[in-house]
């Protein structure tokens, strides 16, 4: 996947797995963050037990579900066009039902269901366990909705249906929701407050995946570094926990170490981190265990203290730079990636230059960059005027992307002539004669196939590169294979 993207939805996936004993057809599309893709696997698992096969053929589906993203207006508009497409197919197949899942479902429930009447089913991120009941309402000829938010981790006991799996890598959700209340973000409103998953269930899922042949896990959450298990409940209620609960509490650094020790031959990644919550213990454990990959996705959003304050980011530019210094001190080979927003309300040219200067200081390996998109209901939408002209937003975004592409090339050049360990994931998109996989630094590497296969860990010598990809030749298996 391209490491530098410009105001686009970060993914769309259609499920492909079927079960011969089921007769109804389920079609799922997922948009947005990795959490949505993970949630779609949970939904497929729940509906499998209700008699649904998953299918890649839209026109044969009895139930069509779209797992949605509300983080940017362009994402919502793309999803609306898909809903229009589905409704045109419903004219041919009136038995088909269309449902919306995820963040957009929670935010626009009344509009989608009652006003525009373009969906039959609306289900929020914490209500997927209610799908059997909701589907029964559809079968009875009614529309159905549940967007209630939970105060506990909702899906810890569900074995996700791995959709479009490569059989090598998988996501494991460890937290849900967010307490940070960044002024531009809808997540706290659509996914609720932070709550963490029982570590026993996390380890069980990881062990099951290892038995099934998976070689790499990404621990997933809106803010993984806020992971806190003290017996259940919201993170904000930790102060009310008993002394026994506090004494045995697990934080993210503890969970990361637990995973690394439990499956020493499995590679581990995590996403997403928030700078104010990342502890030095996490960084030290990354350095301690070879099977924890050396990459940190560390969203900053802006290089200006004034804009960071307006965003309620809860960290300053200096604090962020000091964190990066700590990472480089303990993990000199660690790559760092970012999220950046251009054109936030009241962003001046100096603020924009501060962002470019921060990027020059750090030289990120890659990033995800966007123009500011006002989200209804957020503090920024209520209190700040979206006063940066579109042309200025686009120009600033173009400058940020151009700089990041240069930095990505510089960072990839550092691998030239080096040998790096690669986990083979799939055939390269550009050539059937090449494998593609990622190294510990999360860089995509392509190389001639030879006799290797997906799931192999191989040593690859890098002899070429672009801003997004490393190219090389495999010289043998890794000692960790």
Image (cartoon, rainbow, N blue to C red):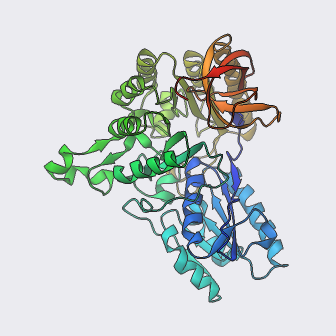
| Quarter assignment of residue 441 | top right
Q: How many marks?
A: 0
In the image, farthest residue toward the right: 92
Residue at x-position 50% and y-position 26%: 294
Image position, residue 112 (x, y; %): 66, 71
Query: Relative to residue 448, is residue 63 drawn left or right?
Result: left
Place residue 432 in its image quadrant. top right
Query: Which residue: 74% across, 56% down?
Result: 78
Direction front: furthest residue: 451
Q: Nearer the viewer, residue 71 or 244?
A: 244
Judge whether 399 appears above or below 155 on screen: above
**Lateral position of residue 139 relative to residue 314, left or right:** right
Of residues 406 and 440, the one drawn nearer to the viewer in this rendering: 440
Q: Is residue 51 above or below residue 210?
A: below
* 112 in relation to 277, above or below: below
Residue at image coords 73%, 32%: 435
Q: Is residue 388 left or right of residue 254?
A: right
* Residue furthest to the top: 417
Residue 183 seen in this snapshot:
no
Percent coordinates x, y for residue 92 in the rendering: 85, 78
Residue 94 in the image, given as x and y percentages of width and height: 78, 82
Occupied quadrant, residue 431: top right
């Amino acid at each position: 996947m391209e490491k530098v993207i410009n105001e686009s939805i970060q993914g769309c996936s259609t499920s492909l797995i079927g079960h011969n004993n089921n007769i109804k057809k389920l079609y799922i599309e997922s948009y947005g963050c990795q959490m949505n893709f993970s949630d779609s696997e949970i939904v497929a698992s729940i509906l499998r037990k209700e008699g649904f096969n998953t299918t890649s053929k839209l026109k044969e589906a009895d139930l069509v579900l779209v797992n949605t993203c509300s983080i940017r207006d362009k994402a919502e508009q793309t999803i609306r066009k898909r809903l229009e497409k589905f409704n045109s197919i419903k004219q041919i197949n009136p038995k088909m039902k269309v449902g919306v899942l995820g963040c957009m479902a929670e935010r626009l429930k009344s509009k989608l269901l009652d006003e525009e009447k373009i969906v039959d089913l609306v289900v929020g991120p914490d209500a997927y366990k209610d799908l059997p009941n909701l589907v029964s309402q559809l079968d009875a000829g009614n529309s159905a909705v549940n967007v209630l938010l939970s105060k506990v981790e909702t899906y810890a006991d569900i074995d996700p249906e791995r959709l479009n799996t490569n059989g090598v890598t998988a996501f494991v959700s460890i937290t849900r929701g967010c307490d940070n209340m960044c002024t531009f973000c809808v997540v706290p409103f659509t996914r609720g407050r932070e709550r963490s998953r029982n570590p026993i269930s996390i380890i069980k899922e990881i062990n099951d995946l290892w038995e099934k042949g998976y070689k790499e896990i990404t621990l997933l959450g809106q803010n993984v570094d806020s992971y806190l298990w003290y017996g259940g409940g919201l993170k904000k209620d930790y102060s009310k926990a008993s002394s026994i609960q506090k004494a045995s509490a697990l934080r993210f650094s503890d969970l990361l170490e637990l995973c690394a020790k439990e499956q020493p031959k499995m590679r581990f990644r995590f996403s997403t981190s928030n700078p104010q919550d990342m502890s030095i213990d996490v960084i030290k454990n990354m350095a301690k265990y070879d099977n924890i990959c050396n990459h940190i996705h560390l969203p900053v959003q802006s290089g200006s203290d004034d804009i960071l304050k307006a965003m309620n980011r809860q960290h300053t530019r200096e604090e962020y730079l000091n964190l990066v210094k700590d990472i480089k001190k303990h993990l000199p080979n660690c790559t760092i990636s970012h999220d950046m927003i251009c054109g936030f309300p009241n962003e001046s040219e100096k603020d924009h230059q501060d962002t470019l200067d921060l990027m020059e200081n750090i030289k990120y390996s890659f990033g995800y960059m966007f123009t500011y998109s006002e989200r209804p209901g957020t503090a920024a939408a209520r209190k700040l005027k979206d006063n940066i002209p579109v042309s200025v937003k686009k120009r600033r975004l173009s400058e940020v992307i151009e700089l990041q592409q240069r930095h990505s090339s510089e960072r990839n050049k550092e691998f030239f002539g080096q040998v790096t360990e690669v986990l083979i994931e799939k055939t390269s998109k550009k050539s059937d004669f090449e494998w593609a996989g990622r190294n510990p630094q999360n860089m995509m590497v392509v190389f001639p196939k030879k006799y290797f296969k997906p799931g192999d860990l191989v040593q690859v010598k890098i002899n070429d590169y672009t801003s997004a990809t490393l190219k090389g030749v495999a010289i043998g298996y890794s000692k960790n294979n």
